[in-house]
Image: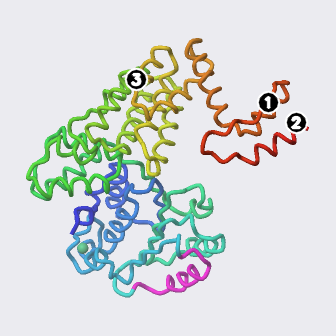
Amino acid sequence: MNLYLKYRPKTIDELDLSGVRKVLNDMVKSGNVGHAYLLTGPRGAGKTSTARVLARVVNCEKNSGKLGEPCNQCSACKSILDGSAMDVIEIDAASNRGIDDIRELKEKIRLAPAVLPRKVYIIDEVHMLTTEAFNALLKTLEEPPSHSLFILCTTELHKVPETIVSRCAQIQFTKATSDEMQRSFARVIKGEGKKVSSEALEYLSKAVDGSFRDGVKILDQVLSNADSVELSDIELVVSGSSNYKVTILVNALASRDVKESLKQLSEATSNGVDMSYLIVSIMRGLRDKLLNSEVEIEVSKFIFALDEVARRLATSLDGELLIQVAIVEWCGHTESNSQIINSLPAQAGPILKSKLQSSDLSPKIAQRSELESQMQKEEEKSPWQIMKEKLKSGEKISPPKPKANEVQDDTIDDAMAIFTS
Ligand SMILES: [Zn+2]
């Protein structure tokens, strides 16, 4: 069994978010679980795991007469855990969004639970329901049967009608913080009987940006061949390299130091750092600096440019070049920058140079660029265009002399005839 399935939170205490744990613990203490809850927040924040925990809290055989953590051992808990419980019905609204689905549901709701004390309906992505389906659901929520519990989950609260929202107790999920992730990963590592250094745990928690699933995937790789987890193990899996520190690049970018930024980028590629990882790390690093007012607001443009680069990475032949272009654009066009750009590998030349053709160039560079672009234009012109221009300017034109062993081009002869007649 993979670690993610093994360590998905199964009790209130194992849930990632401290805020959600508090809401559920308060609910248990009060001994009162309502009829309808609306779980809102981003994907991967643990809404469905929480819904399933709640389904066991109200149905665990050890909780009869009071509420508490589910035991996960009794037949009720086990049947919910393995998905065989008839009285816990999970509906994905994205694929069952029609009136017939809800009508069928309404008819079933009237029936008392078959085995468990409470019939639980978990409706995932509830915002996907049609208007008719929402209306049917609303009627049910207005007069819920005493034995029922509705748990609606959504990533898009604004698409859920207000009439539905107002009939549910809302539980807000947020992206887990680094501290919350550390707690969850420590649980997994301890559960596997392994050890972890605090630096490794902290690095992993920051790297996954609130995704328990991503973090456990990394642990799955690292723990398979080690008894203890060190920082370098995590770095190697996360970034493809354990020798590279992205913070140096982020600092260079924050101070718009093009030389150091390009040097650090080239170091990243020679160390085999994964480009997607690198871009995401830069974006997050700069976002943190922006939030701490350590970098000017214009950095947001660069972050969006990097996002665009990240999208193109999969189809680009040279991801590093795209990042170089974005870095040069962000750091600005100064003469010293252009010298650095000229020293870049040949394949980076044309695109970076074209980036330099903007108004804030030093005159010398601008002149040269203009000349270059003029030459490029000449190359792109067809023989027809060249002749037309020569005719307009009154310049004498003569048929091109055929080179030795070359068949003379009829079309050019025809053109000559038209223009000179
Ligand atoms: Zn139980």
State the residue position of label 1: 397
Three-letter code, disc 3: Ser
Amino acid beneath label 2: Thr
> Element at badge 2?
helix
User: Of 78 and 30, which appears nearest the observer?
Assistant: 78
The spot of residue 244 in percent (x, y) is 25, 34
Q: Return the x and y of residue 205 as percentages of the image width and height.
A: 28, 44
Q: Quadrant of ligand 1?
A: bottom left
**Image mark for residue 343:** 3
Is 372 on the left or on the right of 151, as rendered?
right
The C terminus lies in quadrant: top right
Looking at the picture, the colour scheme in use is rainbow
Instruction: Name the residue tied to disc 2.
Output: 420
Looking at this view, is 161 or 290 the one in front?
Answer: 290
Q: What predominant SS class does the magenta segment belong to?
A: helix
- Counting residues from the start of the chain, the first of labels 1 and 2 encountered is 1
Q: Is residue 355 above or below residue 83?
A: above
Find residue 20 and report its horizontal and vertical position in percent: 37, 53
Would you say residue 75 is visible in this rendering? Answer: yes
In the image, the segment drawn in magenta is 96-113
Distance from label 1 to label 3 (Cα)? 42 Å
Residue drawn at point x = 26 percent, y = 68 percent: 70
Label 2: how many residues lie within 10 Å, few (<14), some (14-19) or many (20+)? few
Give 190 or 252, whichever is nearer the viewer.
252
Q: Residues within 10 Å of mark 1 (few under 14, many from 20)?
A: few
Residue 294: tell me if it is visible.
no
Q: Give, as a three-letter code, the residue at label 1.
A: Ile
